[in-house]
């Protein structure tokens, strides 16, 4: 009996061992469990008298007891006192959560999380409590609650969408976003954003609940919501993840130098596991979310409210920083561009800010271009373009200013071709077409190339180019509100066009001679009727081509030049789709299954066709890099967002000292070490040279012409020269030569 009593007393003091034994055999240790449960009830009564007290009972011992009970109450599901334990914890946190010590409060929250993971308590009871605990000034606790809430909701929607639970929680979070406590509202917003990015809550209701946070009076809350809609929230998170990378080389180096321990090897294994897990996450297929901007219930009403909020915070500049106001402008312009909204006062609001001395003016120019589209009235956009021309595009402005103004004008006119008047366009072209500065000239040529394509009627004849001038008869000038309806896939009529040496071969392809040689096209196996007739026609055409080649060989240079010009004109005519060929292409498209490679090929060939018709400008290196980035991100066809680099492309900025050093180091790679030839020779053979040799190799003849040795050589007689030659031969023989 004495030994049994000693064992029970020892177990009462060692809760970790008792926990292990209860999990193994719950019925055998039921009395010890009830003893600890009674101890918890007594401690709870004492603790209720002074929750903020720092006694031994309310400190670490109570935390250990809570941890023990949270692990073992699930072993006694029929015990009434054990069932009440989760409710007691919830009541304690609700009443005294703000005044508890941080360690004890964290122990209680961890116990509730453990009970929730074991499904001992419902999610509808824990979620309101956890969201209310966001008000506590404990950063570690908020981080723990955030990760658990996201994981819990994710687990609840693994097998199927739990719409009832989701609806309840979304309504609760909507009330939390309007909470007076800024931190609690912001953490609730971050939970919703993470659930959306993880593709758990990706419905329209989630997006519209998040959109209400944009109008919050708290700057941080509004900033988080705006960056979510702009898509910059994910980029910041990815940057943080990259910064937290593990340096495996340094860990291996420490393992080799320091004393080998088991803890060090365990640390290396954990680091290796982390690196492999991140690598698997990178290789895993991405889950793409539909853009949140498309899920708004009423984009027009939301943008109107957003613009009213922008004007309100502009009048009171102390409440919101300038960068946050720029984010407001960016979101409004993106909504206008994507949904093609009509908010005319927004352009009047932007116009005064479009000056070179304005802070971060390239972003403002990019946002102005984002907000322009073909449904905006030209009389609204023309003052904006005129403001850019007056402030940026003039002779006394710096090169960077002129280039930014021309690029911004091009981006605006690309979306709204009628935004620029004919007089202004002609004046800008005359001033900067042959400008001495390369950046300004290239930016102007890009604008000129744009109008050659969209509206060449606004250009003078000498600026249109030869190919455009020849097709002016078929050109129809764009008008406000007109829509260009496509009745076939662009580029399908030249799908078999290949790069060939001369225009004649291209004309043959367009005539349909190389239809069977098209690569990457899936043809049906059915035999076409009249195949023999087609073969006879091909033979006749080949004979005619042979005769044409013989005539070209017999013709003189002038006739050959005229024949080439005729072939070029025929090529330009063939590039225009005839009705018969158009009908043939449409019928062929209905019989074939087009792959992604086919569409890519058609886009390339369509671009080549346009390049043959009109003269364009070579892209700068910056534009090529931006196009490569767009293709990698799958955004090559999405031009709703204007990159700021497009506004500043063509500006050659002065390099910093660090950039100059890096540029010099790059130039030295793969090159011999810098030094004189004499120094290299000395390093190879050793020793130095005499002053006589130095004077021969390093001094010009006019410097040593007056020397006695030089003058004496010139005045030697024939006999003296013979003696010198004999002595030289004798010395050479003695040396063995």
Image (cartoon, rainbow, N blue to C red):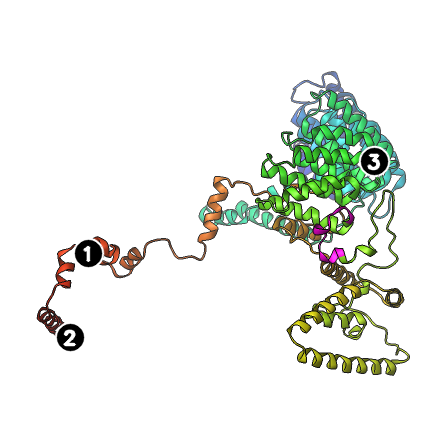
524 shown above or below 16: below
Q: Is residue 646 shown left or right of residue 584? A: left
Mark 3 and mark 2 in contact (Cβ < 8 Å)? no
Magenta span covers which residues?
Answer: 457-469
Mark 3 and mark 1 in contact (Cβ < 8 Å)? no
Answer with mark 1 or mark 2, whichever residue precedes in sequence.
Answer: 1
Q: Which mark is residue 736?
A: 2
Q: Which mark is residue 381?
A: none
Indicate yes or no whether the magenta region holds residue 225.
no
Q: Is residue 430 shown left or right of residue 72? A: left
Q: CA distance from mark 1 to mark 3?
A: 105 Å
9 shown above or below 290: above
Q: Main secondary structure of the magenta part?
A: helix
Secondary structure state at the residue bearing disc 1: loop
Residue 564: quadrant of the picture: bottom right
Which residue in the protein does label 1 denote?
Answer: 705
Q: Which mark is residue 123?
A: 3
Answer with mark 2 or mark 3, whichever residue precedes in sequence.
Answer: 3
Q: Position of residue 326 (x, y in %)?
A: 71, 31
Residue nearest the viewer, comparing 351 with 19: 351
Work out whether residue 536 can be spotted. yes
**Closer to us: mark 2 or mark 3?**
2
Residue nearest the viewer, comparing 66 with 136: 136
Picture residue at 62% right of the left edge, 43% below the top: 440
What quarter of the picture does the C terminus occupy?
A: bottom left
Q: Residues within 10 Å of mark 1 (few under 14, many from 20)?
A: few
Q: Position of residue 259 (x, y in %)?
A: 46, 46
Picture residue at 77% right of the left edge, 73% below the top: 508
Mark 2 and mark 1 in contact (Cβ < 8 Å)? no
Residue 652: quadrant of the picture: top right
Q: Residues within 10 Å of mark 3 (few under 14, many from 20)?
A: some
Q: Residues within 10 Å of mark 2 (few under 14, many from 20)?
A: few
């Amino acid at each position: 009996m004495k030994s049994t009593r000693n064992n029970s007393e020892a177990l009462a003091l060692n809760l970790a061992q008792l926990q292990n034994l209860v999990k193994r055999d719950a019925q055998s240790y039921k009395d010890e469990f009830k003893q600890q449960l009674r101890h918890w009830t007594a401690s709870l009564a004492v603790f209720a008298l002074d929750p903020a007290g720092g006694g031994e009972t309310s400190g670490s011992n109570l935390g250990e007891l809570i941890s023990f009970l949270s692990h073992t109450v699930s072993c006694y599901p029929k015990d009434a006192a054990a069932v009440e334990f989760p409710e007691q914890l919830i009541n304690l946190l609700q009443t005294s959560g703000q005044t508890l010590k941080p360690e004890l409060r964290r122990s209680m929250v961890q116990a509730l999380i453990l009970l929730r993971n074991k499904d001992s308590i419902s999610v509808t009871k824990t979620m309101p409590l956890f969201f209310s605990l966001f008000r506590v000034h404990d950063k570690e606790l908020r981080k723990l609650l955030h990760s658990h809430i996201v994981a819990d909701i994710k687990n609840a929607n693994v097998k199927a969408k739990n719409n009832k639970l989701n609806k309840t929680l979304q309504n609760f979070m909507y009330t939390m976003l309007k909470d007076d406590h800024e931190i609690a509202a912001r953490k609730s917003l971050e939970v919703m954003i993470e659930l959306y990015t993880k593709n758990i809550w990706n419905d329209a209701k989630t997006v519209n609940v998040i959109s209400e946070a944009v109008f919050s009076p708290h700057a941080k809350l509004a900033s988080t919501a705006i960056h979510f809609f702009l898509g910059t929230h994910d980029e910041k998170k990815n940057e943080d993840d990259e910064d937290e990378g593990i340096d495996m080389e340094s860990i291996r180096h420490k393992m080799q130098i320091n004393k080998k321990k088991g803890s060090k090897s365990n640390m290396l294994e954990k680091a290796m596991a982390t690196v492999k897990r991140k690598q698997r996450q990178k290789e895993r297929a991405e889950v793409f979310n539909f853009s949140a901007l498309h899920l708004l219930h009423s984009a027009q009403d939301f943008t109107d409210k957003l613009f009213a909020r922008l004007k309100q915070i502009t009048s009171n500049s102390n409440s919101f920083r300038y960068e946050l106001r720029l984010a407001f402008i960016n979101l409004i312009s993106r909504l206008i561009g994507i949904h093609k909204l009509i908010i005319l006062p927004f352009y009047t609001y932007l116009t005064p800010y479009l000056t070179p001395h304005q802070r971060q003016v390239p972003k403002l120019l990019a946002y102005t271009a984002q907000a322009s589209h073909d449904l905006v009235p030209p009389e609204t956009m023309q003052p904006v373009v005129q403001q850019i021309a007056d402030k940026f595009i003039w002779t006394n402005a710096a090169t960077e200013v002129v280039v930014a103004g021309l690029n911004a004008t091009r981006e605006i006119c690309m979306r709204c071709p009628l935004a620029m008047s004919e007089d202004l366009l002609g004046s800008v072209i005359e001033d900067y077409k042959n400008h001495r500065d390369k950046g300004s000239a290239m930016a102007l040529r890009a604008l000129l190339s744009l109008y050659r394509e969209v509206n060449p009627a606004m250009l003078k004849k000498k600026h249109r180019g030869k190919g455009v001038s020849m097709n002016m008869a078929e050109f129809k000038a764009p008008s406000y509100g007109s829509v260009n309806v496509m009745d076939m896939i662009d580029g399908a009529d030249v799908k078999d066009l290949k790069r060939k040496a001369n225009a004649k071969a291209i004309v043959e392809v367009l005539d349909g001679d190389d239809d069977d040689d098209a690569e990457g096209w899936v043809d049906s196996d059915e035999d076409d009727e009249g195949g023999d007739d087609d073969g006879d026609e091909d033979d006749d055409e080949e004979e005619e081509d042979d005769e044409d080649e013989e005539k070209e060989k017999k013709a003189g240079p002038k006739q050959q030049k005229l024949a080439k010009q005729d072939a070029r004109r025929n090529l330009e005519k063939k590039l225009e789709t005839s009705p018969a060929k158009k009908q043939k292409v449409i019928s062929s498209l209905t019989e074939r299954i087009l792959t992604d490679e086919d569409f890519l090929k058609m886009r390339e060939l369509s671009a080549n066709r346009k390049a043959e018709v009109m003269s364009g400008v070579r892209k700068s290196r910056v534009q090529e890099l931006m196009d490569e980035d767009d293709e990698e991100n799958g955004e090559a066809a999405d031009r709703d967002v204007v990159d700021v680099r497009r506004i500043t492309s063509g500006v050659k900025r002065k390099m910093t000292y660090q950039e100059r050093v890096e540029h010099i180091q790059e130039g030295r790679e793969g090159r011999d070490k810098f030094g004189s030839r004499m120094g290299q020779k000395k390093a190879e053979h050793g020793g130095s040279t005499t002053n006589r040799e130095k004077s021969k190799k390093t001094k010009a003849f006019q410097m040593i012409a007056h020397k006695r040795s030089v003058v004496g050589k010139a005045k030697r007689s024939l006999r003296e020269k013979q003696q010198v030659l004999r002595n030289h031969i004798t010395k050479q023989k003695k040396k063995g030569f």
